[in-house]
Image (cartoon, grey):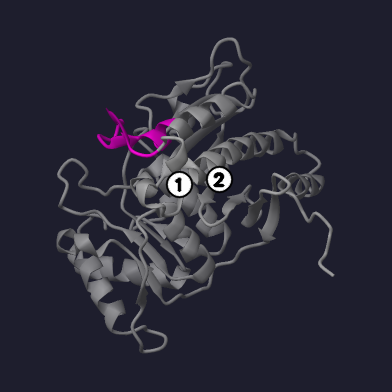
């Protein structure tokens, strides 16, 4: 007979971790609770987007100059409205909004700030490919009750929590509060995220590489040489790597975290407006790097750990390589050998 017990909910997981730390205030529990409420709403709408006219474009462009999808707009509004009144945050930032998002004066503020990408991979919405949400939480460092940009522009080493939600064949939350990485799958029959992937650890070396090879001509020599090498032979087995690329960072990173290997988004010369890469440091790279390191992996610009970078702008972009530590280290060796000048990945 099947086990009828509910299982470990996200709330129970957080509570049990809090008991191990008597100094914990419970704030992170409240933050993750609000994030999961927003995720459930977005998940519901993603699953019926084609039926409720949430597919297609709004006709506007976001701060990145990208065309805004209707579901992008919807997800952004849901996360802002779920988080701005909770009393946990002093300021927020969204990948979809040009400036920091202040907490309305009628709501209380708290000791944390949050940066989020409300709907990563939105170019795949209309073709029903997995998409997701990414979030990163820092403690407030400025003075006064209301936050400022200084609170958001902190190195990833100072993150207190980060995670992502995958909206795919199932909806899954993967998160860390600095004590390992844990995965929770939404059970729609009870409306709860239940622990499905406790203590995720990435393999030291994997055999899958994930990159948009359509940009190959625009990469640095070091990255091209590395990809050529792993397509010919795996240093460990003598066989070539396997290529897997979805085009949704959340989906590609989720697979990399569970199966090992390396995910790459190098800088390229194709887009003169974004010569250092496409991915945003605050909303995508920092939280994913935090999760990777917590799971025993690595994340790098090609020359230095992502988490050591101090952001200089809300929408700063950087080259990004993440995955199994031996794979990332091997990639860095190629960049150092073939691109000794500090030109990044």
335 to 281, vertically: above or below: below
The answer to whether residue 95 is seen in the rendering is no
Asked whether, in this view, residue 332 is left or right of residue 289, the answer is: left
Which quadrant: the C terminus? Answer: bottom left
Is 128 left, or right, of 159 in this rendering? Answer: left
Residue 275 pos. (x, y %): 20, 47
* Residue in the image at 37% along x and 84% along y: 235
Q: Is residue 164 left or right of residue 14?
A: left
Q: Which residue is mark 1?
A: 286
Magenta residue check for 337: no
- Circle 2 sits in a helix, a strand or a loop, which is it? strand
Residue designated by label 2: 162
Q: Quarter-wise, where is residue 43 in the image? A: top right
Per the rendered image, the range of residues in magenta is 55-73
Q: Residues within 10 Å of mark 1 (few under 14, many from 20)?
A: many
Residue 206 percent location from the top left of the image: 45, 75
131 up-or-down from 63: above or below: below
Q: Is residue 229 above or below residue 217?
A: below
Specify the quadrant of the image occupied by residue 320. bottom left
Task: Mark 2: give few (<14), some (14-19) or many (20+) Cα within 10 Å.
Answer: many
Secondary structure at numbered mark 1: helix
Q: Are marks 1 and 2 in contact (CB under 8 Å)?
A: yes
């Amino acid at each position: 007979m099947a086990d009828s017990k509910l299982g470990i909910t996200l709330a129970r997981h957080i509570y049990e971790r809090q008991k191990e730390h008597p100094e914990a205030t419970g704030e992170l529990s409240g933050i993750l609770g609000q994030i999961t409420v927003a995720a459930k709403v977005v998940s519901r709408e993603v699953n019926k987007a084609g039926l409720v006219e949430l597919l297609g474009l709004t006709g506007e462009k976001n701060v990145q100059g990208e065309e805004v999808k209707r579901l992008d707009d919807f997800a952004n509004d849901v996360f802002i409205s779920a988080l701005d009144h909770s009393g946990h945050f002093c300021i927020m930032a969204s990948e979809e909004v040009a400036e920091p998002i202040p907490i309305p004066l009628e709501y209380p503020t708290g000791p944390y700030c949050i940066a989020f990408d409300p709907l990563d991979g939105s170019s795949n919405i209309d073709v029903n490919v997995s998409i997701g949400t990414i979030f990163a939480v820092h403690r407030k460092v400025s003075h006064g009750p209301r936050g400022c940009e200084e609170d958001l522009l902190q190195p990833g080493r100072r993150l207190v929590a980060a995670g992502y939600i995958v909206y795919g064949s199932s909806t899954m939350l993967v998160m860390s509060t600095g004590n390992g990485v844990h995965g929770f799958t939404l059970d729609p029959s009870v409306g709860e995220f239940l622990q499905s992937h406790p203590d995720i650890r990435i393999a030291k070396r994997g055999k899958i590489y994930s990159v948009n090879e359509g940009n190959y001509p625009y990469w640095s020599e070091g990255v091209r040489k590395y990809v050529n090498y792993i397509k010919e032979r795996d240093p460990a087995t003598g066989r070539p790597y396997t290529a897997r690329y979805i085009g949704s960072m959340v989906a590609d990173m989720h697979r990399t975290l569970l199966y090992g290997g390396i995910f790459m988004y190098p800088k390229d010369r194709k887009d003169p407006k974004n010569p250092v890469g496409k991915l945003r440091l605050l909303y995508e790279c920092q939280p994913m790097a935090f999760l990777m390191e917590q799971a025993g992996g690595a994340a790098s610009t090609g020359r230095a750990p992502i988490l050591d970078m101090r952001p200089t702008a809300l929408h700063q972009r950087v080259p990004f390589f993440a995955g199994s530590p031996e794979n990332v280290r091997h990639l860095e060796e190629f960049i150092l050998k073939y691109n000794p000048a500090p030109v990044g990945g």
